[in-house]
């Protein structure tokens, strides 16, 4: 198997796992009574947020320069994203 085929296979596996997690989150929410659905939570340790994103929630999720963590839950979808504010602060401090 070539490196390209291996990478494609790995990429397909990640996509399949992501879709399975998304489907699991949707089914989990739909099984609850409508009054109890929050459309955000965790599947095991993996966070999900299926609420429509707002600029303030996206900013709050992705720009937290004072928070210690670089990895944060996605503001929309399943999984994690980067805390760009913290990353910016670390790089800025390192080049000073």
Image: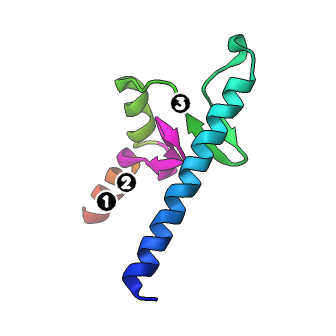
Rendered location of residue 72, percent (x, y): 51, 46
Residue at 31 percent across and 59 percent down: it is 91
Q: Nearer the viewer, residue 28 or 71?
A: 28
Q: Is residue 52 visible from the viewing direction of this image? A: yes
- Judge left or right: residue 27 versus residue 59: right
Give the residue number, with chain letter if any, for mark 3.
Answer: 50
CA gap between label 1 and label 3 equals 31 Å
Residue 91 numbered mark, or none: 1
Q: Is residue 84 magenta?
A: yes
Rendered location of residue 16, percent (x, y): 55, 56
Residue at 39 percent across and 32 percent down: it is 58
Callout 1–callout 2 Cβ contact below 8 Å: yes
Q: In terms of secondary structure, where does tag 1 sit?
A: helix
How many residues crowd mark 2 within 10 Å: few (<14), some (14–19), many (20+)? some
In this picture, is 41 found above or below 65?
above
In this picture, is 6 found above or below 72?
below
Callout 1–callout 3 Cβ contact below 8 Å: no
**Which segment is the magenta one?**
67-85
Give the residue number, with chain letter if any, for mark 2.
Answer: 87
Q: Nearer the viewer, residue 45 or 1?
A: 1
Rendered location of residue 27, percent (x, y): 68, 33
Q: In terms of secondary structure, where does tag 2 sit?
A: helix
Residue at 64 percent across and 37 percent down: it is 25
Q: Is residue 22 magenta?
A: no
């Amino acid at each position: 198997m070539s490196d390209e085929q291996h990478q494609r296979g790995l990429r397909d596996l990640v996509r399949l796992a992501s879709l399975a997690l998304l489907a699991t989150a949707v089914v989990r929410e739909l099984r609850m009574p409508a009054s109890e659905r929050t459309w955000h939570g965790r599947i095991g340790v993996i966070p999900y947020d299926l609420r429509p994103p707002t600029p303030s929630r996206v900013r709050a999720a992705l720009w937290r320069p004072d928070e210690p963590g670089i990895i944060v839950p996605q503001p929309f979808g399943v999984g994690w994203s980067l805390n760009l504010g913290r990353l910016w602060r670390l790089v800025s401090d390192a080049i000073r």
